[in-house]
Amino acid sequence: AAGVIQSPRHLIKEKRETATLKCYPIPRHDTVYWYQQGPGQDPQFLISFYEKMQSDKGSIPDRFSAQQFSDYHSELNMSSLELGDSALYFCASSLGGGLGETQYFGPGTRLLVL
Amino acid sequence: AQSVTQLGSHVSVSEGALVLLRCNYSSSVPPYLFWYVQYPNQGLQLLLKYTSAATLVKGINGFEAEFKKSETSFHLTKPSAHMSDAAEYFCAVSRYTGTASKLTFGTGTRLQVTL
């Protein structure tokens, strides 16, 4: 079965640079979520989209922005990168964003900021 | 606010022994609870999900979890550990904000399986 696809899988950037992470949800899934997992930490919710509209926002820095496109893929844009942004970024998708919907996670993008 | 607490950041068991990973939840409404597993350098894989249909939930790879309202617990068990079970396990609760559901994770339990 098709899974969530994330690209790139690994990314190395310098401080103050910009990064763009891409997420392709499972076919027919209309909801996308982004999570950040720091080293040795649990995943933290950043932002979600349902039918191309932002549906919820968590602890996402103002330097980050995201959107969901007409084909339901999503991009997380990160500017003015800081050392603390080094983390594993997960995208998850679900069919509908309603109560208790199961979220299926991608393999993650590992971002290293030097 | 809904949250989960995982007791024990590291658990070590012998191959063939019972696996018990503890998760307690806090919720003012019936919760939707999940267990995810994360193998080294990989993403999160869904093990099982509680939706109030049954208190004993069976998942993949021989894992199961029992929802106990009286104890506010959702512990994960497996009768016989295998070396391939070594991974990080996260308990999570789904919180619905009216427009979307988001997962709040516990701090994780690293399972080590020894010979």
Image (cartoon, coloured by chain):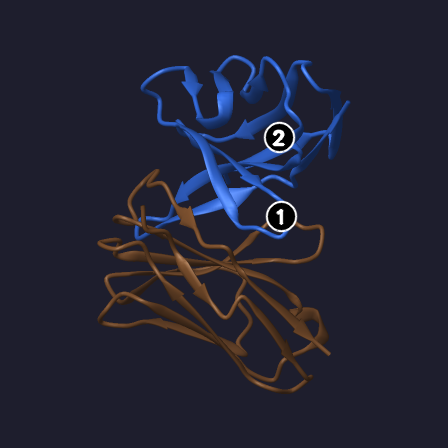
**Residue A30 picture quarter:** bottom left
Circle 2 sits on which residue?
B85
Q: Residue at x 64, y 20 (%)?
A: B81
Q: Residue at x 52, y 45 (%)?
A: B44
Q: Are marks 1 and 2 on the same chain?
A: no
Q: Quadrant of the C terminus of chain A?
A: bottom right
Of residue A12 and residue B106, the one placed in the foreground of this image is A12
B60 with respect to A51 (left or right): right
What secondary structure is marked by label 2? helix
Where is residue B67? Give x, y as percent: 47, 18
Where is residue A17? Give x, y as percent: 61, 87
Circle 1 sits on which residue?
A42
Query: As displayed, is residue A61 above or below residue A31?
Result: below
On what subunit does the disc labeled 1 rest?
A
Query: As displayed, is residue B25 above or below residue A27?
Result: above
Of residue B44 and residue B22, the one placed in the foreground of this image is B44
Q: Residue at x 60, y 39 (%)?
A: B106
Q: Residue at x 59, y 26 (%)?
A: B24
**Badge 2 amino acid:** Asp
| Chain identity for the colour brown used in the image | A
Q: Which mark is residue B65?
A: none
**Number of residues whose C-alpha sits closer than 10 Å to that of mark 2, classed few (under 14), some (14–19) or many (20 or more):** some
**Badge 1 amino acid:** Asp
